[in-house]
Amino acid sequence: MRGFFVVMKERETRGNFSKSAVGKTANAFGTSTYEFVKKGPKGDVVRIRPRKGVIRGRLMPALAAAIYEPTSDPLVNAEFNKRLPVVADILLGNTVGVLNVRYINAIGGGDDLENVAQIAIDLAEDKADETGTVIRMVFGATEKMPVRALSYPLPVLQMMVAMEEIGITPPQLQLVFANNISAGINEFSQDEVAAQTKLFVVAEQEYLKRFFPELSDRVVFLEDVPLESVGTLANDLQAIKKAIEEKGDRELLAQLLSKGGKDSIAYGGAHLLFHDLAPEGLLKPVDGVVQPDMIIPQTMMSVGGRQEEIFYVLRMDAKKKGGLPFHANQRVKTVQFVTDHAVPPYRMAKYRYGDRFEDMPNGDIALQDVGRNVYGLVDPTVVFDFAYHLQVSLARSNFVEFLGEKRAAT
């Protein structure tokens, strides 16, 4: 019955799209090898490899129900139908630019997966900004930014380049630093966190100008403001946290607490603010950064490392259970992509200064310490991420020279 239903939906869809576009888009939906991240039968977070045709079976009905109005210009319609399956391939990791080297390997398998169909349409129409479609990555506060953090946006940049190559404007990439919320939870120095953020922003802007100059005006750097300064947001965060504690899946909450301790639920609530409610006034440009204006999100493609999986499942569970201090029509449409990055909490490798050593062995290399001698081995995840960054960057410019310049600057 599932196969018959999909075929019927494909026939219904042909009223808006060309027969070729429907067939190729269905193939893109059916070819994806992304794993699903979702809540397991015991409330745990699981990754599953979908059976053949499952993604297509979920996305073709969504495509048939999606909003698309053909124009009166047959040439514009023809270009749209040509782009649609290619955009679907890009979003689902089937294209060379995203597949090689591919660092996005999973997608949220909750109810919001169906939003991929409308996102593909909006992008194929070249209406990313008009529809408020953005890509967002959120960084937690840190007192020592690792150098490999420069590789976190790289899978998204690969995706954006693939879109530009077919003549569409990619969504704005919003790099968000949750400095006020997470520094408060972790009792970090706000001054040190701000300094590390600035260090990253300067390095990332330099990286973009050299390696992805065509995207430098599509990336913005934002940070949260103190919640008390924006209406009821401080109270809203407490209400979200209360709803999670009272209505959240017990097994899921136990898994969350075992991983991150007592502050994990507060982090979970903050994730709903940044990725699902995304209220105006929550974010501002990082101080002193010259950049385009922030696009107010209506649809958000969230991208994060493996630690985001449990927070994604928590977000989907919380929205389904209810009790949140905002209504469904106040939420942005979402989809979650997961990269291979294993990220915070950071442990810095031990550096040698004469007879004196600093920090822990087998950890990260801090961005502020690029070029200093490392005593002992860095963590294997650091090597893995750096190798990925090196491989992609060398194909575009001289990455070794770039690091040498950063070393001279420090």
Image: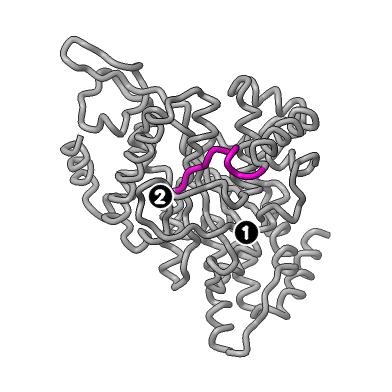
Label 1, secondary structure: give it: loop
Residue at 42% across / 55% down in the picture?
219
Where residue 367 sits, quadrant-wise, is: top left
The answer to which of 360 and 236 lies nearer the viewer is 236
Residue to which mark 2 is pinned: 101
- The correct choice, above or below, for 279 with respect to 11 in the image is above
Percent coordinates x, y for residue 215 in the rendering: 38, 60
Element at label 2: loop
Question: In x, y percent, where is residue 168?
Answer: 47, 71
Reading the image, the residue beneath label 1 is 298
Q: Which residues are magenta?
A: 222-231
Looking at the image, residue 119 lies above or below residue 398? below
Give the quadrant of residue 106: top right
Q: Which residue sits at x=65%, y=63%?
A: 117
The reply, left or right, for residue 182 in relation to residue 404 is: right
Whether residue 230 appears in magenta in the rendering, the answer is yes
- Which callout, 2 or 1, points to the residue nearer the camera? 1
Q: Nearer the viewer, residue 306 or 23?
A: 306
Question: Where residue 393 is drawn, which disc sits there?
Answer: none
Visible residue check, residue 47: no
CA–CA distance between discs 2 and 1? 30 Å
As shown in the figure, which amino acid type bears the numbered disc 2? Val
